[in-house]
């Protein structure tokens, strides 16, 4: 039934978050970030590999405007907010230059990755939320729910039509 499918969808979302979150210290993404610049590869699962490959394509298509290697910069801003003072602009500028280069290396079989510079830290942000929403939507469709809408922290994924064959009606409250 529907409760079983919803439970399975939430389990998938939790599993993806445990791999892709920069807030969870034991996530794959956090483990990769800790090794940034060390030269060591870290084994990753398919979801992180898939989102990184898509992110690299988006980075190229956006001429670097979309960059998932901004984790170190975001950490500076989080610290600044916490301390209620502006971050070091020179340090931010240096990081911005470094993350424009080659930040990521895949092992020959693509099962492991390494961040090539300690300035390169992953933060998937809204790209990660959208990825999770899309994966959960695909799971719901596979379990027999052809019409669904998934909200992952404000990032929404939905099937093309609702059960009435009319387009979804979405409103902002």
Image (cartoon, rainbow, N blue to C red):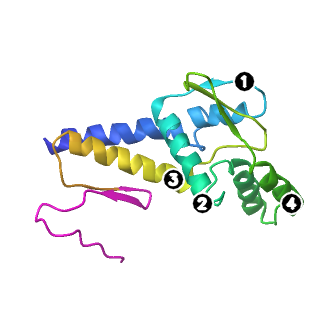
For label 4, the residue is 88
In the picture, residue 156 is in which quadrant?
A: bottom left
Q: Residues within 10 Å of mark 3 (few under 14, many from 20)?
A: some
Q: Which mark is residue 127?
A: 3
Q: Quadrant of the N terminus?
A: top left
For label 2, the residue is 62
Q: Disc 2 or 1, which lies upstream in sequence? A: 1
User: Going by the picture, which residue comes out furthest to the left?
Assistant: 164
| Distance from Cα at disc 3 to Cα at disc 4 | 26 Å
User: Going by the picture, which residue comes out furthest to the right?
Assistant: 90
161 up-or-down from 75: above or below: below
Q: Are marks 1 and 3 in contact (CB under 8 Å)?
A: no
Q: Which mark is residue 40?
A: 1
Q: Position of residue 64 (x, y in %)?
A: 66, 57
Q: Is residue 54 left or right of residue 23?
A: left
Q: Main secondary structure of the magenta part?
A: loop
> What residue is at 12 percent from the left and 60 percent from the top?
163
Which secondary structure, mark 3? helix
| Distance from Cα at disc 4 to Cα at disc 1 | 29 Å
Q: Are marks 4 and 1 in contact (CB under 8 Å)?
A: no
Q: Disc 3 or 4, which lies upstream in sequence? A: 4
Q: For the magenta stretch, what is the residue range?
A: 151-173
């Amino acid at each position: 039934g529907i409760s079983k499918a919803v439970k399975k969808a939430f389990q998938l979302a939790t599993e993806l978050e445990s791999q892709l979150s920069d807030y969870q210290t034991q996530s794959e993404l956090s483990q990769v970030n800790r090794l940034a610049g060390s030269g060591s590869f870290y084994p990753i699962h398919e979801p992180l590999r898939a989102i990184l490959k898509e992110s690299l394509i988006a980075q190229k298509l956006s001429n670097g405007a979309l960059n998932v290697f901004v984790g170190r910069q975001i950490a500076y801003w989080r610290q600044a907010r916490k301390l209620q003072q502006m971050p070091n602009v020179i340090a931010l500028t240096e990081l911005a230059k470094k993350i424009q280069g080659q930040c990521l290396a895949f092992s020959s079989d693509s099962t492991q990755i390494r961040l090539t510079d300690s300035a390169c830290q992953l933060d998937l942000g809204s790209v990660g939320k959208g990825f999770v929403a899309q994966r959960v939507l695909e799971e719901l469709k596979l379990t027999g729910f052809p019409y669904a809408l998934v909200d992952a922290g404000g990032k929404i994924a939905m099937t093309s039509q609702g059960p009435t064959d009319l387009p979804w009606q979405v409103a902002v409250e």
